[in-house]
Image (tube, rainbow, N blue to C red):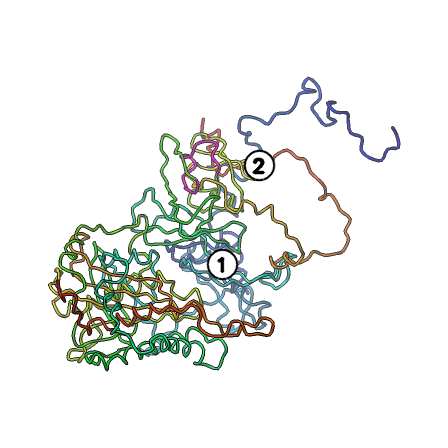
């Protein structure tokens, strides 16, 4: 007991916490499936059974183009309770590992702009956009398809920022600093090398508004403006499946096929959250660490 | 206006109730042009360069910070308590090498490990670019249709069975209708049965041409061939199909002029895709050239390879393009292994080219191929190339009707074969007879 209190006191003095998760060996084709691999088995073992099956079907480290079987959660988390309502059922889906980091150099190949050929454009059950199988060199990978991508097209990926802006074709990926102001872009990264996390839904596109000494300002589809470093890669054009928002569901059953459960039928009085809101735009989100005034002076 | 319960909106153009007062009254508020000043309301987090708060700083474990400090675990207590650390036990060692429970060597420690990567084509390799990729890998020139030698065998009326069409249709019906008691048999059951029946029909010609009896079928044999192709090492390995061996080799199909004319052909590349895509990269391999048969086998020369594509599920089944590529690769592998056995490992242009035929089917569609290996000098892309004649997508019949089509209580479409084409079996038979039939109209080697 004394030892435990001693360690607790030491822990309070020092900057200690649980040791960080062991880093998996960084495979060059490591695709981060939904962030870090969560500790599925927690650090303690009890005599009672855990309340739910291990929900982590995301166990694969090596990249593959073959579809992987998914386990549906039904809105439940690791405790087994519903955390998000309205999810459940729906058609079985298989996950295709999408490579969001467009500028990915194969180890051994020289760095520089490279081309890839589009082999196939197909429907993905896990997202609203279509996906395209592209092949370059000795590898094949899935990427988010842009509006007019057809099988047989050549798409270029480059990491070089020249003095003059490039006249980019749709489907090519360039750093924001190399694109002319006013291009429509999609699959945008917030930090260079992180992988695309913005503007991935069907039919969306962002606009490159201006380029300001080493950073670029992009307008997202929600009209919010975002400032990122100019070395962040983005794909040119609109995302595929542009008529996605014009589709008519038609019946309740189709929503059930999509995995959406009906909402509660209980009548609630609408509170402050309801109704149309007219607000000024939120301020520009900056993912760039600009030097402080004190450092500049 | 008193007593109204809805909020009163000011008239259009009037001043907003919440706008600026004083000298700026009436001015519309613009968004500030310059970036917002750094105030607690416009920024989040510490400014760059400033020290991070305690909870955001990198934390090293206590054990690293205080040397010699041990974690107190609940191992001695033999049960979990939440305030002690989880015991990490050392990995249990068996103490002796149990071959059934050992993890195996790493790739780098294996005796056959090599630094240089080798690309292997095996029986499940589905090549992305199909035949074009196989042509580049085997340094081959493609010719559409079967060679004229084989076509002349088809045209001769003496090279046909009695009641050929009827017997072939019986074979198809046997495979697809009469073989099982279930109504619609699966491809796995009818495809090999069909091939066996067609081979049996071909063998009945042995009474007319006695040299047909000097042949033997071989199944489940493994071929190995290795070659260099423009700084990549390529291999063909594994079980491929049913091989028809013969005592006498097939004579070259193309004339010397045609072989020399292939020197001008430029092999087709497909930038940006590398020609070794979809091949398995291995570092642990053995450089072996093996026909699959030992010395002294009475039927030493490969004649025809039969490929049966009978996977039930469509994604696993080879598409016609991929099947043709597989046929080409394995015909080449067998020919190369035989050539290296006969003429040695040195890359050279062959005096007597090796000819291997190949037939692939998935029960209805047949692919015919005649491959002639002219050279084993495959490292460079210039020079004499090999030749292949491909006749692709030959339908033996259009479809089978399992249930009768009854309209107004009259059987209008009886069950059976629909759209039978006799030419396909004639080509099948011609490829079988090739090498045993002496053509009087043509010279053997031009």
The 10 Å Cα crowd at callout 1, few under 14, some 14 to 19, many 20 or more, is: some
Residue shown at 28%/72% (left/top)?
B429
Q: Residue under mark 2: which chain is it in?
A: A
Name the spot of residue A127 as percent of width and height, x first. Answer: 53, 52
In the rendered view, tell whether residue A137 sits above or below residue B14: below
Relative to B42, is B299 on the left or the right?
A: left
From which residue to which does the magenta span run? A170-184
Is A174 colored magenta in this rendering? yes
Residue at numbered disc 2: A223
In the rendered view, tell whether residue B122 sits above or below residue A99: below
Name the spot of residue A199 as percent of width and height, x first. Answer: 52, 43
Measure how far apart labels 2 and 1 are at the Cα level: 31 Å
For residue B221, the mark is: none
B37 and A36: which is toward the camera: A36
In the rendered view, tell whether residue A109 sits above or below residue A211: below
Residue at numbered disc 1: A95
Relative to B27, is B72 on the left or the right?
A: left
Relative to A220, is B238 on the left or the right?
A: left
Identify the image quadrant of residue B331: bottom left
């Amino acid at each position: 007991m004394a030892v435990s209190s001693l360690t607790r006191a030491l822990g309070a003095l020092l900057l200690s916490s649980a040791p960080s998760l062991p880093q998996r060996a960084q495979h060059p084709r490591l695709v981060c499936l939904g962030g870090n691999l969560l500790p599925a088995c927690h650090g303690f073992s009890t005599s009672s059974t855990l309340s739910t099956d291990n929900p982590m079907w995301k166990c694969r480290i090596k990249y593959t183009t073959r579809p992987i079987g998914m386990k549906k959660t039904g809105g439940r988390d690791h405790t087994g309770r519903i955390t998000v309502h309205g999810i459940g059922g729906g058609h079985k889906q298989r996950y295709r590992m999408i490579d969001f980091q467009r500028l990915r150099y194969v180890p051994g190949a020289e760095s520089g702009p490279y081309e890839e050929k589009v082999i196939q454009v197909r429907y993905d059950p896990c997202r609203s956009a279509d996906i395209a199988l592209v092949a370059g060199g000795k590898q094949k990978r899935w990427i988010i398809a842009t509006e007019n991508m057809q099988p047989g097209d050549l798409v270029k990926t480059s990491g070089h920022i020249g003095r003059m802006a490039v006249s980019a074709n749709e489907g090519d990926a360039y750093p924001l600093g190399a694109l002319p102001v006013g291009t429509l872009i999609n699959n945008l990264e917030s930090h260079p090398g992180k992988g695309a996390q913005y503007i991935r839904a069907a039919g969306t596109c962002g606009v490159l508004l201006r380029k300001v000494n080493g950073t670029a300002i992009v307008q997202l589809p929600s009209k919010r403006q975002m400032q990122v470093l100019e070395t962040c890669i983005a794909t040119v054009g609109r995302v595929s499946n542009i008529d996605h928002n014009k589709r008519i569901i038609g019946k309740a059953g189709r929503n059930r096929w999509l995995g959406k459960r009906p909402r509660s039928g209980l009548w609630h009085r609408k509170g402050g959250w309801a109704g149309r809101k007219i607000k000024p735009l939120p301020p520009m989100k900056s993912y760039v660490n600009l030097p402080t005034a004190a450092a500049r002076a | 206006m008193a007593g109204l319960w809805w909020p009163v909106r000011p008239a259009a153009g009037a001043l907003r109730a919440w706008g600026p007062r004083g000298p700026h009254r009436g001015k519309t508020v613009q968004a500030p042009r310059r970036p917002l000043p750094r105030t607690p309301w416009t920024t989040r987090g510490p400014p760059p360069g400033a020290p991070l708060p305690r909870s955001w700083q990198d934390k090293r474990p206590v054990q690293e910070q205080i040397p010699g400090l041990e974690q107190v675990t609940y191992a001695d207590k033999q049960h979990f308590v939440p305030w002690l650390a989880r015991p990490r036990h050392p990995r249990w060692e068996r103490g002796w090498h149990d071959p059934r429970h050992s993890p195996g060597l790493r790739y780098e420690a294996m005796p056959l490990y090599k630094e240089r990567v080798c690309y292997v084509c095996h029986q499940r390799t589905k090549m992305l670019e199909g035949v074009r990729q196989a042509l580049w890998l085997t340094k081959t020139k493609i010719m559409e249709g079967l060679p004229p030698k084989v076509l002349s065998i088809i045209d001769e009326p003496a090279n046909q069975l009695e009641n050929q069409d009827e017997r072939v249709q019986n074979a198809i019906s046997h495979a697809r209708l009469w073989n099982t008691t279930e109504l619609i048999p699966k491809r796995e059951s009818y495809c090999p049965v069909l091939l066996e029946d067609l081979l049996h029909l071909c063998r009945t010609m042995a009474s007319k041409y006695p040299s047909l009896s000097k042949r033997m079928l071989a199944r489940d044999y493994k071929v190995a061939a290795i070659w260099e192709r423009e700084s990549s090492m390529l291999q063909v390995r594994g079980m491929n199909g049913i091989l028809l061996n013969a005592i006498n080799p097939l004579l070259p199909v193309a004339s010397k002029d045609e072989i020399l004319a292939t020197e001008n052909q430029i092999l087709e590349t497909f930038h940006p895709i590398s020609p070794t895509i979809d091949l398995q990269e291995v570092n642990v391999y053995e450089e072996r050239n093996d026909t699959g048969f030992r010395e002294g086998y009475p039927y030493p020369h490969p004649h025809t390879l039969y490929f049966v594509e009978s996977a039930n599920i469509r994604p696993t089944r080879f598409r016609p393009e991929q099947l043709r590529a597989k046929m080409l690769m394995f015909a080449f592998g067998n020919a190369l292994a035989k050539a290296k056995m006969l003429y040695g490992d040195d890359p050279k242009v062959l005096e007597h080219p090796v000819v291997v035929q190949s037939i692939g089917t998935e029960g209805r569609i047949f692919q015919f191929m005649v491959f002639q290996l002219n050279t084993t000098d495959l490292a460079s892309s210039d020079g004499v190339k090999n030749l292949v004649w491909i006749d692709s997508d030959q339908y033996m019949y259009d479809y089978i009707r399992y249930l009768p089509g009854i309209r107004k209580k009259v059987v209008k479409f009886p069950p059976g074969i629909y759209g039978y084409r006799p030419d396909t079996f004639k080509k099948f038979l011609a490829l079988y007879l090739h090498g045993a039939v002496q053509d009087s109209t043509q010279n053997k080697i031009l």
